[in-house]
Amino acid sequence: MTGSNPHFTGSIICLFGLLFFAPGLFAAVPIQGNAFQGAGAAEARVKLLTAAESYLGTPYRYAGHDRRGLDCSGLVFLSFREGLKYTIPRTAEGIYNWTEKIATSELAPGDLVFFVTTGSAVSHVGIYTGEGRFIHSASDGPQTGVMYSQLDESYWKRTYKGAGRALPWDEGTARAMASARTGGAVRQEGTASARPSGTGAAAGSVISRPTWKDPGFFAGLGADWIWGGIFEGASSSFRGISTLITVGYKWPSYRAGLELRPQWDNALGVFRLPFMLSFGTDTFQVFGGPAYTFGEPSLELRGEKRRHKGGGALLWEAGISGAFPPIRIGPGALSFCGELAWQPYRWEDGVGYSFKPELAANLRVSTGIHYLWRLASKK
């Protein structure tokens, strides 16, 4: 029996070492070279930014690596992997050591920005999107999770370490990305386009079509079926139609809006024009405001009309709205909702009070669909 060959044993050890460490070695240098130049490099940057933007609103989770939660390096790691099919180091410090260091004045959309938030090593990373803004997953502050921030905010200005570049940036790339500013073709399926006018911190921006989960201004339309046949005085299941036109502002968890709600009430024979203020979440809202009634409200009961006061007058309406969790479609969300609203019509003088007819005259029960969408903004 012969002894083992030390050269053979050494080769086996080297082979296993290469197999184990190869991914780290291949990710040890930034994505440079001839594979990405000019329009190709510009498209790569847009894909990276688009991938990062798709995670906006995702909550922060330490060591998180999916849509249930992300930390800062997890966002950058997944953006490279999903946008460019490229594996990079997993920690903020590792990504910092991996990139080519550049001056802040050279920053372009798709470059990386680094911060020292704890200790002395790099502990936070984000992706620069242009005009002093970056996207990142924040772990502390008034807002957490994946969002946009500004480099000149006091905290980020104080903890800023420097900038790094992983994707090529040359004159051809700058020209290709700048073409988007005048309607060029560097665009990722219509969701984001990079629009720098040159290089440098103030020389690039990303125009994004925001999704419903992003904070900002919104608009909306809706239509509701007003139900009859529930109380005395409305024999048909169809009582009328209520529509919705709204604008407002949303935060991560709440939203507020101004609403115009034109309504036709077939049971009362009137047209109402309420102007509402609303506040709540995506699944529960309260609203109220003035409402003008055109026509004279009256209910027909057993062949007789029961008249009410309030026609041709400015009264008010208030109510609550509940909805199923919204279905995100494009830049907005579609909701199936139900509403209870009250308008204070009074029975005519000389007519005795009757509970069911008065409830039927004043209570609106409706169900319908509302679509709200985020208004485009410059990121």
Image (tube, helix red, strand yellow):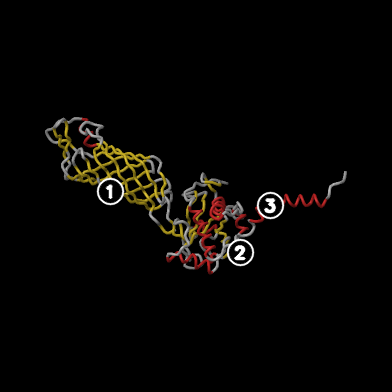
- Distance from label 1 to label 2 (Cα)? 57 Å
Residue 236, compared with residue 117, is above or below; it is: above
Residue type of the residue flagged with mark 1: Leu
Relative image position of residue 300 (x, y in whole percent): 16, 34
Task: Say left or right for 201 vs 238.
Answer: right
Disc 2: which residue:
33
Q: Which sits earlier in the primary sequence, circle 2 or circle 3?
A: 3
Disc 1: which residue:
260
Q: Nearer the viewer, mark 2 or mark 3?
A: 2
Q: Nearer the viewer, mark 1 or mark 3?
A: 3
- Residue 21, label in figure: 3
Can residue 226 be seen here?
yes
Q: Which residue sits at x=26%, y=32%?
A: 230
Relative image position of residue 188 (x, y in whole percent): 48, 57
Residue at far left of view: 350
Residue 190, quarter of picture = bottom left
Q: Are marks 1 and 2 in contact (CB under 8 Å)?
A: no
Residue type of the residue flagged with mark 3: Phe
Relative image position of residue 366 (x, y in whole percent): 29, 39
Residue type of the residue flagged with mark 2: Gly
Residue 172, compared with residue 126, is above or below; it is: below
Relative image position of residue 169 (x, y in whole percent): 55, 65
- Distance from label 1 to label 3 (Cα)? 63 Å
- Residue 335, label in figure: none
Can residue 164 be seen here?
no
Q: Secondary structure at mark 2?
A: loop
